[in-house]
Amino acid sequence: MCLSIPGKITEVYADGSLIMGKVDFGGVLKEVCLDYVPEAQTGQYVLIHVGFAISVLDEDEAMARMDLVREIENYEEELNSDEIR
């Protein structure tokens, strides 16, 4: 199973022959490779898998995926708190 996380591009730049960018994951900025989505621009959302943007998302889709990730996190926290009791 592969996990990909949506993030918002805050900066696009070249690093040698690679298209790179800074992507915001809810306040955490990470450097990612944008070579697989050369059409991606600052302000757009992309789906990131192991440091590579693999697709461009519209904002509604990105928010829906972020909500799902939050739900999974909350569920895991609930499971862990039940195990402690």
Image (cartoon, rainbow, N blue to C red):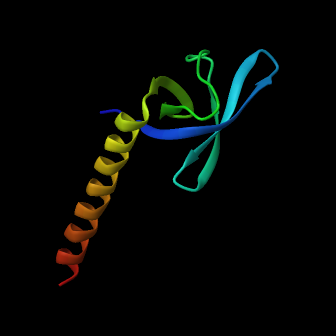
| Residue 79: x %, y % from top left | 20, 68
Horizontal arrangement in the rendering, residue 45 relative to residue 71 (left or right): right
Q: How many marks?
A: 0
| Residue 60: x %, y % from top left | 36, 37
**In this rendering, does residue 3 appear at all?**
no
Location of the C terminus by quadrant is: bottom left
Q: Residue furthest bottom?
A: 85
| Residue 5: x %, y % from top left | 43, 40
Horizontal arrangement in the rendering, residue 83 relative to residue 29 (left or right): left
| Residue 45: x %, y % from top left | 50, 34
**Residue found 32% across the figure and 50% down from its top:** 67
Q: Compared with residue 24, is residue 78 higher up or lower down, i.e. above or below? A: below
Q: Residue furthest right?
A: 16
Location of the N terminus by quadrant is: top left
**Residue found 78% across the figure and 15% down from its top:** 17
Residue in front for this viewpoint, 77 or 63: 63
Where on the picture, by quarter, is residue 52?
top right
Q: Compared with residue 25, is residue 33 higher up or lower down, i.e. above or below? A: above
Residue in front for this viewpoint, 33 or 64: 64
**Residue found 64% across the figure and 32% down from its top:** 42
Horizontal arrangement in the rendering, residue 29 relative to residue 77 (left or right): right
Where on the picture, by quarter, is residue 59?
top left
**Residue found 62% across the figure and 15% down from its top:** 38
**In this rendering, does residue 34 appear at all?**
yes
Where on the picture, by quarter, is residue 36?
top right
